[in-house]
Image: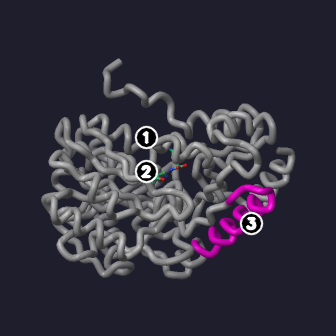
Amino acid sequence: HAERLDGLGTTIFAEMSAKALATGSVNLGQGFPDRDGPDSLLEDAIAAIRAGVNQYAPARGVPALRQAVVEHQQRFYGLTYDADTQVLITTGATEAVAAALLAFVEPGDEVIALEPYYDSYAAGIAFAGGRRVPVTLRAPSYRLDLDELRAAVTPRTKVLLINSPHNPTGTVLTDEELRGICAVALEHDLVVITDEVYEHLVYDGQHRPIASYDGMADRTVSISSAGKTFAVTGWKIGWVTGSPSVVTAVTTAKQFLTFTSGAPFQPAVANALALGNDYYDALRADLQSRRDLLSDGLADLGFEVHRPAATYFVTTDIRPLGHTDGIEFCRMLPERAGVVAIPHQVFYDNTHYGKPLVRWAFCKQPTVLQEALTRLQKL
Ligand code: PMP
Ligand code: GLN
């Protein structure tokens, strides 16, 4: 195989979900909800299929969804976009990230990414011929050190790839951190690719899109998707917003990856984006109570728990239980306790920082979380 596949192997999510099935384990590994959300969304997609919305969508996406993305950005963040020139619908945020990297990274360019980073970033950077430069969010606070960010910039740096709310740490970048990132981007003329798929899953603090900061509109590729916000991770409907030239560049790459994405899902997601605040509030409140259930339970079991401000995931340090290596721990966990979790290590270049850390997904029914905690007492 080509060199660009070196080190990519099989994603940890495929490996661990297969292991969960094979061992009958409670799967707190891969982040997907065990209830599909909201009924109106599901019914709208079925109706679209029955109504014959089954052929290629327009290249940039169904107009109703592009318009809904515009209205959503205005409603939640006061950002104004034009639905025809500043929105692209993609096959999930994953394709959006890959297309954005292909659009802006020349072979040999450096891409600074917050470490631990979501695993598709490494692949996307490699496919574009770029070089990954990590800036580590370190325990116990998992905050961004702006001096380290500045020090990571070289003449070859082209892109800052950020992710807030952040998977796997749950960090929500603060106003100060975002300002610092903007200053670096402006000073060195960098493109910012920002993955905001957890924008509506914030329990402490507030999400503010980096595109809303002064000077950022023309250099930012903003990415989100329907998977987390509407509990339909298998639909793979995502979107990019940005300046017309940014969106055209990403569209040029995207059109030859997949051309278009999930036609009947698009009008359904358009309606869902317009759901009232009661939907978004209930989603957040529900997940927050699960976060607390799992965080408290893991702490009672003796783990050192980092209660996340956002996302689907709690991070623990396993050393208080006498373990030192998260990969070993997660490999023995299904057989020993009937639970699956994800080792942080796979999201790092500097693996020593992630070695004792394990990620647990709480986007599951409370009874399922309780069952996992009961099983973990066997450890
Ligand atoms: N970015 C992050 C940070 C994620 O955690 C995930 C996984 N859900 C994705 C992107 C992928 O999103 P999608 O399923 O929309 O491709
Ligand atoms: N984003 C989800 C996670 O972090 C799942 C992603 C995947 O399966 N590729 O668990």
Q: Quadrant of residue 285?
A: bottom right
Mark 2–mark 3 distance (CA, rounded to whole Å): 26 Å
| In front of the other: 151 or 325 | 151
Residue 60 in magenta? no
> Mark 1 or mark 3, which is nearer the start of the sequence?
3
> Mark 2 or mark 1, which is nearer the start of the sequence?
2
Is residue 94 left or right of 276 when viewed as pictured?
A: left
222, above or below 260, in the image: below
Any atom of ligand 1 within 8 Å of the CB at mark 1? no
Q: Amino acid at mark 2?
A: Glu
Q: Residues within 10 Å of mark 2 (few under 14, many from 20)?
A: many
Q: Amino acid at mark 3?
A: Asp
Answer whether residue 90 is visible to the viewer in this image. Answer: yes
Residue position for label 3: 296
| Quarter of the image where the C terminus is located | top right
Is residue 233 left or right of 100 when viewed as pictured?
A: right
Q: Quadrant of residue 35?
A: bottom right
361, above or below 331, in the image: below
- Asked if the residue at tag 1 contacts the one at tag 3, i.e. Cβ–Cβ closer than 8 Å, the answer is no
Any atom of ligand 1 within 8 Å of the CB at mark 2? no
Residue position for label 2: 115
Q: Which mark is residue 199?
A: none
Residue position for label 1: 349
Q: Position of residue 377 (x, y in %)?
A: 85, 50
Q: Residue at x 16, y 54 (%)?
A: 248
Q: Position of residue 218 (x, y in %)?
A: 16, 66
In magenta, the rendered stretch is 284-304
Label 1 element class: loop
108, above or below 89, in the image: above
